[in-house]
Image: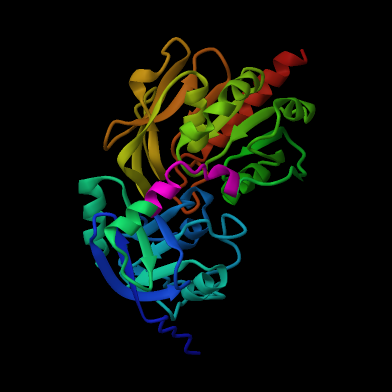
C-alpha cells in the first residue's frame, strides 16, 4: 500500500535572526512557534514527539532520515504531543515496521503540529551551537525577524509545566512501595519503570498542596521531568523542601533542577542543550562512565550549591556540567539524565532500584 503524503506545499522556518529555511510542510499549516533545538538520537522520534519536556520547542533532528519505522501505539510518552514543530532532512512516508500503524506525517495531521522536511538540518544545528538559543516559527509564509522576535517575547515568561501536568490525581495499583509522583511533565516510561518494579504509584498535579500529598502516605516521592525554565517553579520550592525532608526522594531532569532550587542553588540556560541518547556521564564515587538519554536546556550552577547539604554525584563528560546530586544526610538524590531511557540506552536503570532500596531502609528504621 502506497501511503505517500506529499505535504501541503512549501513551508518556511523563520529564525529571529531573519534567516529563512524553505522546505515541504506537513501536518499543521501554521502554529509552530518556539525555541529551535536539536536532537542527536538516531531513533526515538516518536518518544521525542510525545515527550512533554519538548513543550514550546521546535525540534530539529540531526539524523537525516526520520519516520522510517512509522508510529505505533506502544511508544507514546504522553496522551498527545507537546512540541510545537519538527524540522527534518528527509521525512519517510512509507515506513517499514511490523508495529507501524501510521506515518509520522499522519500523526502530525492528527494532532495539529507542523513538520518541515527537506531542510539542511546540519546548518540549523551549527547555528544553534554557535549562536546559542534561537527562537523560530514554522509557517506557510515567511515572517519578518521583527514578527518572530515579537512572538518570542510573548512566550518568554510563560510557564509550561501547568500545560502538561496532570489535572487530577491518578492512582496505579501495585504490591510494593507507594510512590507519589509529582508530575512536572512526566514521561509515561517513568511510570512504567516503577510499575514494572511492582510499586504502587499515585501521580499528582504539580501544584498539589503538601498536606494532600502527606494524606496519601507515600513511602517515597519522585519529581518528574518537564519543560521550561526551572526557576518558574521557585514559588513551590519551599513547600516541596518540607516534603523532601520527610520522605526518600528522587528527582529526574526538571525534578533534579527543582531539587537544587529547594536548597538555594541557581540554574542557568545552556548555550545549547543536551538532547539525545548518546551523552556520557561519570559517576564520581566509582569513576564509571554511563551513556545516557537526555533532554534539557538548563543546568544547575555548581558554584551556587550549598556543599554542606548537597554533593555532586554525576558529571557530564563532555562539558563538565552537573548531572546528579545527592543529599549528604537524607535519602534524597537526583539525576539530570533519564534512567528510564525510553528510547535507550538503559545503562542507568539501576537508579530506580537504588530509590526502592532507600525507601526500604527508611521504612525498616521507621517501623522498627
Q: Is residue 155 magenta?
A: yes
Compared with residue 319, is residue 249 higher up or lower down, i.e. above or below? above
Q: Is residue 139 left or right of residue 174?
A: left
Could one spot residue 198 in this view of the protein? yes
Q: Nearer the viewer, residue 11 or 367?
A: 11
Tell me the residue at 66%/25% (across/down): 359
Q: Report the predominant secondary structure element of the magenta stretch.
A: helix
Compared with residue 183, is residue 116 higher up or lower down, i.e. above or below? below
Q: Is residue 336 magenta?
A: no
Callout count: 0
Could one spot residue 70 in this view of the protein? no
Q: Residue 307, percent across and down?
A: 41, 13
Q: Residue 2, percent across and down?
A: 47, 89
Q: Is residue 62 left or right of residue 157?
A: left
Tell me the residue at 39%/75% (across/down): 25
- In the rendered structure, which segment of residues is drawn in magenta? 151-163
Report the residue that reaches farthest toward the bottom: 1
Coloration mode: rainbow
Tell me the residue at 59%/44% (across/down): 162
Q: Residue 313, percent across and down?
A: 41, 24
The quadrant of the rendering that contains the C terminus is top right
Tell me the residue at 69%/46% (across/down): 167
Residue 14 lies in quadrant: bottom left
Q: Nearer the viewer, residue 223 or 228?
A: 228
Q: Residue 178, percent across and down?
A: 73, 33
Residue 353 lies in quadrant: top right
Amino acid at each position: 500500500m502506497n501511503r505517500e503524503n506529499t505535504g501541503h506545499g512549501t513551508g518556511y522556518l523563520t529564525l529571529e535572526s531573519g534567516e529563512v529555511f524553505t522546505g515541504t510542510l506537513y501536518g499543521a499549516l501554521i502554529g509552530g512557534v518556539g525555541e529551535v533545538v536539536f536532537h542527536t538520537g538516531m531513533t526515538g522520534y516518536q518518544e521525542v514527539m510525545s515527550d512533554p519536556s519538548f513543550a514550546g520547542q521546535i525540534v530539529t533532528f540531526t539524523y537525516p532520515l526520520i519516520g522510517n519505522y512509522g508510529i505505533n501505539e506502544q511508544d507514546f510518552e504522553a496522551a498527545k504531543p507537546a512540541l510545537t514543530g519538527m524540522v527534518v532532512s528527509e521525512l519517510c512516508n512509507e515506513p517499514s515496521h511490523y508495529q507501524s500503524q501510521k506515518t509520522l506525517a499522519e500523526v502530525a495531521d492528527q494532532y495539529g503540529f507542523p513538520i518541515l522536511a527537506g531542510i539542511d538540518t546540519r546548518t540549523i544545528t551549527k547555528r544553534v551551537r554557535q549562536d546559542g538559543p534561537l527562537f523560530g516559527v514554522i509557517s506557510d509564509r515567511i515572517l519578518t525577524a521583527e514578527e518572530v522576535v515579537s512572538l518570542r517575547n510573548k512566550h518568554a515568561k510563560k510557564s509550561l509545566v501547568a500545560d502538561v501536568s496532570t489535572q487530577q490525581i491518578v492512582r496505579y495499583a501495585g504490591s510494593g512501595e507507594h510512590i507519589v509522583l509529582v508530575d512536572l511533565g512526566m514521561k509515561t516510561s517513568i511510570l512504567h519503570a516503577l510499575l514494572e518494579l511492582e510499586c504502587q504509584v499515585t501521580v499528582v498535579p504539580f501544584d498539589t498542596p503538601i498536606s494532600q500529598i502527606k494524606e496519601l502516605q507515600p513511602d517515597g516521592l519522585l519529581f518528574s521531568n518537564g519543560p521550561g525554565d526551572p526557576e518558574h517553579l521557585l514559588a513551590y520550592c519551599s513547600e516541596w523542601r518540607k516534603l523532601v525532608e520527610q520522605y526518600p526522594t528522587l528527582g529526574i531532569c526538571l525534578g533534579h533542577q527543582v531539587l537544587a532550587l529547594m536548597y538555594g542553588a541557581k540554574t542557568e540556560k545552556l548555550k545549547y542543550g543536551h538532547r539525545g541518547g548518546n551523552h556520557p556521564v561519570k559517576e564520581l564515587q566509582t569513576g564509571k562512565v554511563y551513556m545516557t538519554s537526555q533532554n534539557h536546556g538548563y543546568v544547575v550552577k555548581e558554584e551556587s550549591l550549598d556543599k554542606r547539604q548537597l554533593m555532586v554525584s554525576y558529571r557530564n563528560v563532555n562539558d563538565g556540567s552537573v548531572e546528579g546530586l545527592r543529599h549528604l544526610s537524607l535519602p534524597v538524590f537526583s539525576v539530570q539524565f533519564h534512567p528510564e531511557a525510553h528510547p535507550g540506552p538503559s545503562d542507568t536503570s539501576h537508579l530506580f532500584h537504588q530509590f526502592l532500596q532507600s525507601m526500604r531502609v527508611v521504612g525498616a528504621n521507621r517501623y522498627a
